[in-house]
Amino acid sequence: MSVPIVGTVAELRATVAGWRREAASIAVVPTMGALHEGHLSLVRAALKKADRVIVTLFVNPKQFNSAADLQAYPRTEVADAARLAPLGAHLLYAPDASEIYPEGFATTVSVTGVSEGLCGAFRPGHFDGVATVVAKLFLQTGADLACFGEKDFQQLRVVRRMARDLDIPIIIFGCPTVRETDGLAMSSRNVRLSPPEREIAPRLAAILFETAERIAGGGRVDEALARARSLIVDAGYTRVEYLELRGEEDLAPMSKLDRPARLLAAAWLGQTRLIDNVRVMRE
Ligand code: PAF
């Protein structure tokens, strides 16, 4: 069994039109490829929610902060299609850049508020790139629902806000982060870790979970965050970019736990930047 692959909006829309004639509901799972179990869990979730599932594969140049990072991003389309086939995804949409950003493309979708701070502070323009491409993918596919991973929690909030603000009729589902057995959040960037870095990497998740428990148990937020920052560096991480407690819905900074929250972090391990987040709720 293989997944049909299309590369143009015209082919995509012709397929979708056929499904609509059958009154099928349609889900989209946007990806940049290099599929791992985290992506596959989104596809499985989408298959439970809709009659047809489109997986998109587009390495979006507008969301990378450096040409080197874009260049280094793994491109594994043949392997990706092979991984999707046994799941029963109905279509892989893998457009060229010219299909997404044709000659003269001049529009940027920019979401304020939830895109500010956290990754937004360290990756200027990143969420504009994400919001722009995801808006296009929603409009090109015309899907009824979309599945995104909670691993990129800020991205999930940006995409929800964008769809709501632009009246794009799509329901967005956030799906739980998938972790390796040692707790490391699955990410296409994990392949860049050297064997010693790979040993250290799961400490980030462990420290986030410990810190979340500490805060949920009534510990002072500022003290818990300071402790966690030094533990991450002591574990062997090169640098903590941010570690913050934010409101789960609005991503507003929180200095005490008075509503459901997320503890979000980005940290560098050698040349690799890893992000992770966990839920924090009063016990
Ligand atoms: O999470 C990703 O892989 C990307 O940011 C997305 C949502 C596919 C947009 O390019």
Image (tube, rainbow, N blue to C red):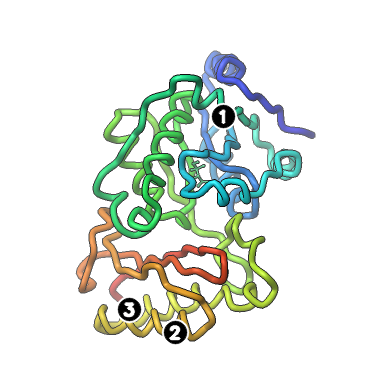
Mark 3, residue position: 225
**Left or right, residue 164 beside residue 95:** left
Label 2 residue near ligand 1, CB within 8 Å: no
Image quadrant of residue 263?
bottom left
- Identity of the amino acid at label 3? Leu
Tell us which disc is closer to us: 1 or 2: 1
Mark 1, residue position: 97
Mark 2, residue position: 231
Closest to the observer, 131 or 168: 131
Q: Which mark is residue 74?
A: none
Q: Are marks 3 and 1 in contact (CB under 8 Å)?
A: no
Disc 1 is placed on an element classified as helix
- Identity of the amino acid at label 2? Leu
- Identity of the amino acid at label 1? Ala
Q: Where residue 181 appears, x then y in whole percent?
A: 63, 71
Q: In the rendered view, tell whether residue 185 sits above or below residue 232.
A: above
Q: Are marks 3 and 2 in contact (CB under 8 Å)?
A: no
Q: Which residue lies at the image location 44% right of the left edge and 28% below the top edge?
A: 136
